């Protein structure tokens, strides 16, 4: 009889033990939640700036390869809503919108001529990709830069 009671006692958790574990998990979650939010925003900004830089390089390389004009143009009202990469009448790629991120100082479209140089806009292009969250949050920024020769750079921090 005693062995049956001992086996039953070791079969599971008590309510008190379960509540203690849940309390510890709640404290850990409360401590790490703000850091996770900033981490998530940082990853979104970095992903969007990498996608933008990659698609700019794709447009330039396709302009060189095809000896034709290639462009990166917004799908709707600005690059935040996504963009398409095209050469002539052929769409080479597209990106959809990314929430929580904005692109500052982006032109209406970016056009590369058949030599791989930027023909529109006619000056050095600098776009800041940043989180558009609450100003109380840490604002994460990256600079995507295209010089007139068509070289693309993606670096941390705001464009100066």
Image (spheres, rainbow, N blue to C red):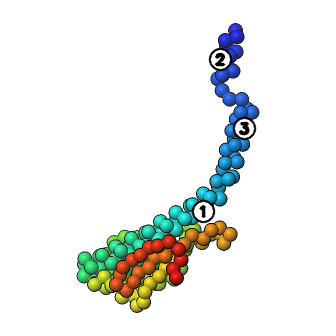
Residue 126 lies left or right of residue 1; in this view the side is: left
Q: In this view, does 30 lie above or below 15?
A: below
| Secondary structure state at the residue bearing disc 1 | helix
Report whether residue 151 is seen.
Answer: yes
Closest to the camera, between mark 1 and mark 2, is 1
Question: Pointer 3: what residue?
Answer: 20
Where is residue 120? Give x, y as percent.
39, 88
Residue shown at 69%/38% (left/top)?
21
Residue 14 lies left or right of residue 154; in this view the side is: right
Question: Pointer 2: what residue?
Answer: 7
Do the residues under discs 3 and 1 have CB atoms within 8 angstroms?
Answer: no
Mark 3 and mark 1: Cα distance apart in space: 29 Å
Residue 46 lies left or right of residue 119; in this view the side is: right
12 vs 74, nearest the viewer: 12
27 vs 14, nearest the viewer: 27
Nearer-N-terminus badge (2/3)? 2
Residue 154 lies left or right of residue 114; in this view the side is: right
Nearer-N-terminus badge (3/1)? 3
Residue shown at 62%/58% (left/top)?
35
Mark 2 and mark 3: Cα distance apart in space: 23 Å
């Amino acid at each position: 009889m005693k062995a049956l009671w001992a086996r039953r006692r070791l079969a599971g958790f008590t309510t008190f033990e379960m509540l203690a574990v849940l309390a510890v998990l709640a404290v850990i979650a409360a401590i790490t939640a703000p850091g996770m939010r900033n981490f998530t925003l940082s990853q979104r900004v970095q992903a969007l700036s990498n996608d933008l830089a990659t698609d700019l390089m794709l447009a330039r390389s396709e302009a060189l390869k095809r000896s034709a004009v290639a462009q990166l143009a917004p799908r709707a009202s600005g690059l935040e809503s996504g963009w398409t990469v095209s050469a002539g009448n052929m769409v080479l790629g597209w990106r959809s919108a990314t929430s929580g991120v904005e692109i500052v100082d982006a032109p209406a479209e970016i056009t590369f001529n058949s030599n791989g140089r930027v023909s529109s806009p006619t000056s050095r292009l600098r776009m800041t990709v940043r989180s558009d969250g609450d100003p109380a949050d840490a604002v994460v920024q990256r600079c995507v830069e295209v010089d007139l020769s068509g070289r693309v750079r993606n670096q941390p921090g705001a464009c100066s």
